[in-house]
Amino acid sequence: MKLSGLLPGKTARVRTVGGEGALRQHFLDMGVIPGAEVTATKLAPMGDPMELRIHGYELTLRLADAEKIEVEPLQQAAAPREKQDRRRYSDHPGLGEEGKFHPKGTGDPLPEGTKLTFALVGNQNSGKTTLFNQLTGSNQHVGNFPGVTVDRKDGVIRGHADTLITDLPGIYSMSPYSSEELVSRDFVLKNHPRAIINIVDATNIERNLYLTVQLLEMDVPMVVALNMMDELRGNGGTVDVNAMERMLGVPVVPISAAKNEGVDELVRHAVHIAKYQERPVEQDFCGAEDHGGAVHRALHAVAHLIEDHARAADLPLRFAAGKLIEGDRLIEEKLALDQNEKEMLQHIILQMETERGLDPSAAMADMRFDFIRRVCGECVIKPHESKEHRRSQRLDRVLTGKYTAIPFFIGIMALVFFLTFFLIGPFFQDLLADGIGALRDLADAGMRSAGVNQTVQSLVIDGVFEGVGTVVSFLPIIVILFFFLSLLEDSGYIARVAFVMDKLLRRIGLSGRSIVPMLIGFGCTVPAVMSTRTLPSARDRRITILLTPFMSCTAKLPIYGFFVSVFFPERSWLIITGLYLLGILAGILAAHVFKNTLFRGEAVPFVMELPNYRFPSPRNVMLLLWEKAKDFLHRAFSVILIATIVVWFLKSFDFRFNLVEDPHDSILAAAASLIAPLFAPVGLGDWRIVTSLISGFMAKESVVSVMEMLFRDGLTALGSLGAACMLVFSLLYTPCVAAVAAIRREMGRRWALGVVFWQCTLAWLAALIVRLIGMALG
Ligand code: GDP
Ligand code: MG
């Protein structure tokens, strides 16, 4: 039968895994391999995707993808092996081995003063961020990977000034199928870190070791940090660290990143292996007897075949051999095999397929999991069902329940937005705005009494304080919004939202994960764009970024309020709600267009892990907030400050650089009148409207303040049709400078300009349609 037909609660064994390319590799990497046991746990409220349990963790899968997996139903799950519990194990694995397997102090260390660079690699949710923060303190900075925009953090390990540790994106394997995986792989291959710190979630050890096994093949000094040991031990499990070190051939250090246990020891090991360049002892995981040894023989044959090529291409041999068998094109190109060798390679692979009865990728994945099963059988005492897991299941019964999931989701989001935008946010915003206002008055009075030049004074007061000050006053709202969102994310709830909403978002070519940035977009496009970094694929990230401007941000509310109160006072709520819905509708249409033109590719399959709910670590949350605040302030005082000064300049001077009394005579007025005819067809041809729209590019709120300033004789000349056009135009036209800058940072300059251009075009067309309909109706 097909996996999609497996009823919740039933268990089956995987027979074959269909599908192709990225999707299939992803299945295999997540442990969905022939022979694995899966239990269906539940369906999402809308009937798709499904959740299953495999290798002791929860995985989500779309039904359409589950169709491709053949399973064979089992009567009941295999009982956990009893004898494990009776095995004696060393009591205090917490101490590690201090050189038992890697003679300390022998060999030649790297010369004094060499920078010890480390890559921190691990699965998503294994505690990388937590460990990174423990290792580096707050001494970190955020950079961008060239090409792919994934957050990458570098930091110095506390107490070791000559180290540099890089936090790589969370990955599940070294396959080149997602941008993150490629980034991490390239980092290890090209940047040549001196050592790898591989963080492994001990409560989910089988799945996590899959990456470990692949990292060992990279032939880079490595230490395994066995994280979450507190949780594992708390539930009666443990790991025989000594035995695991022996089997993996690298130091294994049990730690708890959250409780800062074992971290010092981890650092000692890491520094040591890096300094002495102690490479993994073991890189051979293919058992000579496993399933007749077909994979073993093929791997060794390929390794011998390509030895010289791998050396020439500067690739780790075992890694290259494995990737060739898996059919990795990138590695194949790099190796530059000649025709004869290629043919031999094909023969070897074919022979393996016939003997093993599995295709190459599945055979390799199976080989790795075989080894992992041996390691776990020897070294790991599985915990009884953890209280964290039971708690998660209880919570999930409500939060992903068939009838409760969506109401709870709406309720939780409403609460977050209410607290952020109506209760806590405005309070602090007013406080900050008052502070800035007081500062401005002080500066004003100071400059006046010191007799500072009028122009300079106007620049400081009107430009810096009014412009940048208004933007800075949004800081509390942004920080508070991020606070709640990081609570939701760290606790594991966001993963559930993605699970629940996947079916809806799939219709527009996205996956459930894109829901988060879109929700934030209703608050502010800037953090929304920033939050797309959590999305797993570059394609999804880009589409999502392009859709966030359609979610009406809070800065547009003043515009809506202003026009509605003047022109449509009786139908205000109807019109404002209508505008929000219109934005969403336009976004859905745009998504369809993107899906069928610019981003034709396939959405990443929604194969996602659902972690247990956890209490977020306050330290992580605080560090995140601090980083966001810094980021935001940095932007306010760079891009926004410069743009503000430019607009102030344009509206204060005429072409002969004389200060103007009446803004009608300013460069801005002249320039605006030049483009005003463009806006005439949609009824917005007045230069003052054009000016206010342009200043809205700085910050949407300023549309209102500029209009109030320029339309001294009242707005009524605009007429209600003009107001309607203006509302629709404001809803859809270019996001503000800050948002465009954020888009630029994520996607590059050309996309950012593209967004400005097509949002304006779209807004123009929509306003035209409104005008034509309005005129037709009289
Ligand atoms: P990342 O996705 O790999 O960066 O993982 P995070 O650092 O964000 O951690 C994921 C979750 O695991 C967070 O909720 C952490 O608070 C939690 N966590 C991290 N380390 C530990 C640990 O040692 N013990 C326990 N119980 N939880 C941890
Ligand atoms: Mg993280």
Image: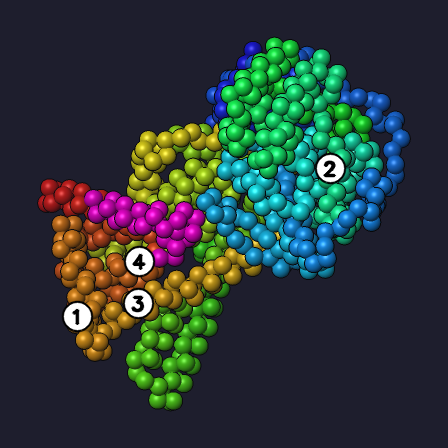
- Tag 4: amino acid: Phe
- Tag 2: amino acid: Pro
Query: Which residue is nearer to you in this view: 524 or 306?
Result: 306
Separation of residues labelled 4 and 2 (CA atoms)? 56 Å
Horizontal and vertical percent for residue 251?
77, 41
Is there any visible trace of residue 277 in the rendered image? yes
The tag earlier along the polypeptide, 1 or 4, is 1
User: Which disc, if any, is residue 280?
Assistant: 2
Separation of residues labelled 3 and 4 (CA atoms)? 12 Å
Separation of residues labelled 2 and 1 (CA atoms)? 74 Å
The tag earlier along the polypeptide, 3 or 2, is 2
Q: Which residue is mark 4?
A: 697
**Res 378 quadrant in image:** top right
- The nearer-to-camera label among 3 and 1 is 3
Q: Marks 3 and 1: CB-CB under 8 Å?
A: no
Horizontal and vertical percent for residue 672?
19, 62
Residue pictured at 43% horizontal, 48% vertical: 746
Q: Marks 1 and 4: CB-CB under 8 Å?
A: no
Q: Say what secondary structure mark 2 lies in.
A: loop
Q: Say what secondary structure mark 3 lies in.
A: helix
Separation of residues labelled 3 and 2 (CA atoms)? 58 Å
The tag earlier along the polypeptide, 4 or 2, is 2
User: Which disc, if any, is residue 646?
Assistant: 3
Number of marks: 4
